[in-house]
Image: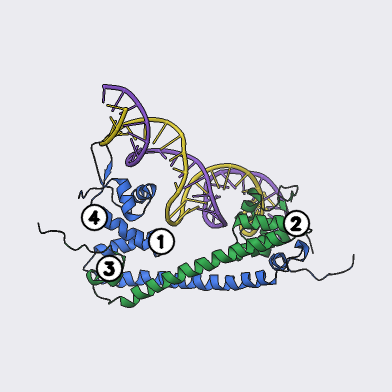
Chain colours: A green, B blue, C purple, D yellow
Amino acid sequence: MSDILAIGELGRATDTKVETIRYYERIGLLAAPLRTSGNYRAYDRAHLNRLSFIRRSRDLGFSLEQVRALLDLADQKDRPCEAVDEIARVHLAEVERKIADLAALREELRDMVRQCGHGAVRDCRIIEALSPPVETATSPD
Amino acid sequence: MSDILAIGELGRATDTKVETIRYYERIGLLAAPLRTSGNYRAYDRAHLNRLSFIRRSRDLGFSLEQVRALLDLADQKDRPCEAVDEIARVHLAEVERKIADLAALREELRDMVRQCGHGAVRDCRIIEALSPPVETATSPD
DNA sequence: TATGGACCCTGTAGCAACTACAGGGTCAAG
DNA sequence: CTTGACCCTGTAGTTGCTACAGGGTCCATA
């Protein structure tokens, strides 16, 4: 029941690569822990909670800057949570826009793939769809 | 009716930043053009077509490596277009997976935002949703 | 003819968010 | 006392650009 974790254990507990944890420390997202006599990082439960929060936020697609803001807000328990709501709403809007973009793209790709006649490249509809429009001759040479 | 374009003109014609064109040249995606006496890049129609193809492919979300493969294939007009089809299908599958991921994410975010009671941060459902599960006490100390 | 501004050149560094080394130190088991 | 798993720092790579800095070129206008 040791409440102190080495970096590898913390990584396993939060499904985070060791390098990523060190990276989060370097950019100031996760507080630097105390060190053992052998200079190993020694993480406690607070670090574990913090990193779990970060990972969960990242999994939901929040940027590191958004995560940073959420962490700050999460610590100010007395303040109203409007700012939190705002970050989540903005992110939701981004996600919705991305979905719309990808859906449009999917339709174009589907059309392309459907039209592929499986012949030679010279007749390939996919290549054609990607190529610039053929110019109608301007004047005979 | 000059068929020779300066890099800025090519950029305007293809909606591409000048730096991006030079970048494509550096990574070998767009052939280096001839130079004028003043060492300016002088692009011809082939470059214009090529860059248009690249841009269109990029707009459809193909990676630069995929674009590179498509360009190679587009030049081998005699070969069957199966490889082209394959690239497009793989990309389509990627896009579909991304859409599914984002849709799942959207639902989670919607739930979070819907549950926000607009109270204090300490009661915020969004923060709660991001936080690691509270542990049921193990034993009294 | 000078000069101003728009354009072009090279080379390098920065962005997000990691990931992957290289070249070492630490620690517990056998 | 050695082996192997783990840890350390520091730096460079990834993708696809973008943004300078510090110059050179070109052309029209005064």
Q: Are marks 1 and 2 on the same chain?
A: no
The label number, if any, that marks residue B74 in the structure image: none
Asked if residue C10 is positioned above or below residue A48 in the image, the reply reads above
Residue B16 location (% of width, % of height): 37, 53
Place of residue B77 in the rendered image (x, y in percent of width and height, measured from the top left) = 22, 66
Mark 1 — residue? B63
Contact check, label 1 and label 4, Cβ < 8 Å: no
The residue identified by callout 3 is: A128
Q: Secondary structure at mark 4?
A: helix
Q: CA distance from mark 3 to mark 4?
A: 16 Å
The total number of labels drawn is: 4
Q: Position of residue A72 (x, y in %)?
A: 71, 55
Q: Residues within 10 Å of mark 1 (few under 14, many from 20)?
A: few
Q: Secondary structure at mark 3?
A: helix
Amino acid type of the residue that numbered disc 3 sits on in the rendered structure? Glu
Residue plotted at (78% across, 69% down)? B135
In the picture, measured across the screen, residue A5 lies left or right of residue A98, that is: right
Of C13 and B108, the residue lying toward us: B108
Residue A75 disc label:
2
Residue B46: mark in rendering: 4
